Image (tube, helix red, strand yellow):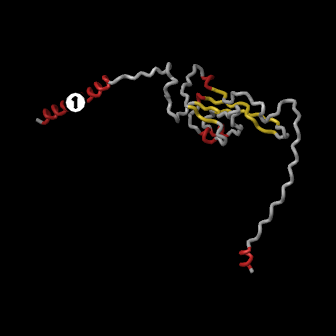
Amino acid sequence: MGSVKDYFSSLGTGISSLVKGMGVTGKEFLTKKVTEEYPDHRKEFEYAAPRFRAKLQFIYEADGRNRCTACGTCQRNCPNGTISITTKMVDMPDGKKKRKLDSYLYDLGSCTFCELCVTTCPFDAIEFTNDFEQAVFTREKLVQKLNYLPEQPNDPAPKPGTPVKPAAAPAPKAAPAAPKADDSENKKEN
């Protein structure tokens, strides 16, 4: 007799479950539908989360200079070699040589978006944007040069053909004053 009772019990549970599910479906069927026409109205909506990491970019100052000093910290910390930095040595007006950024290549196709390059940059020169539309047809287009702006006329490198002025002789520094002995220590020794 227990099998007939179990049969009708499970049948009742199944029917109540079906009614609950149909109720949820019926409510959704009657609610107003919202259709976002994504490609046409992409400026009106923010589709990516504010902290979404999509693409690496330089932070440019108001005068058009980037903050990168070509130290290579981001390249060393990248776990899979996404960043490739090439530098050049330039002569400064004071006669010294300085390393300068020549090209900063970023491979979006092999980036793991771990943000180690951004967090370890000592000059806060790079950041991730949340522009998620990065679809291209070939992998070669995923390799991007981040320092795409031309060099500024007032950059530290002198123009070719300009004479380099010798650096002014540094003024002699005064010798540091000797620290005074503490009177309380002298009294204890006596």
In front: 167, or 89?
167
* Count of marks, rendered view: 1
Tell me the SS state at disc 1. helix
Where on the picture, by quarter, is residue 3? Answer: top left
Quadrant that contains the N terminus:
top left
Left or right relative to 14: residue 81: right
Residue 27, given in percent of the width and then of the height, sits at: 29, 26
Where on the picture, by quarter, is residue 2? Answer: top left
Residue 71, given in percent of the width and then of the height, sits at: 70, 40
Q: Which residue sits furthest bottom?
A: 190
Where on the picture, by quarter, is residue 161? Answer: top right
Residue 148, given in percent of the width and then of the height, sits at: 69, 27
Left or right relative to 4: residue 145: right
The residue depicted at 46 percent of the width and 20 percent of the height is 37
In front: 159, or 104?
159
In front: 41, or 75?
41
Quadrant that contains the C terminus:
bottom right
Left or right relative to 72: residue 37: left
Q: Residues within 10 Å of mark 1 (few under 14, many from 20)?
A: few
Q: Which amino acid does the dot numbered 1 rest on?
A: Gly
Residue 115, given in percent of the width and then of the height, sits at: 58, 38
Residue annotated with mark 1: 14
Q: Which residue sits furthest left?
A: 1
The residue depicted at 58 percent of the width and 28 percent of the height is 109
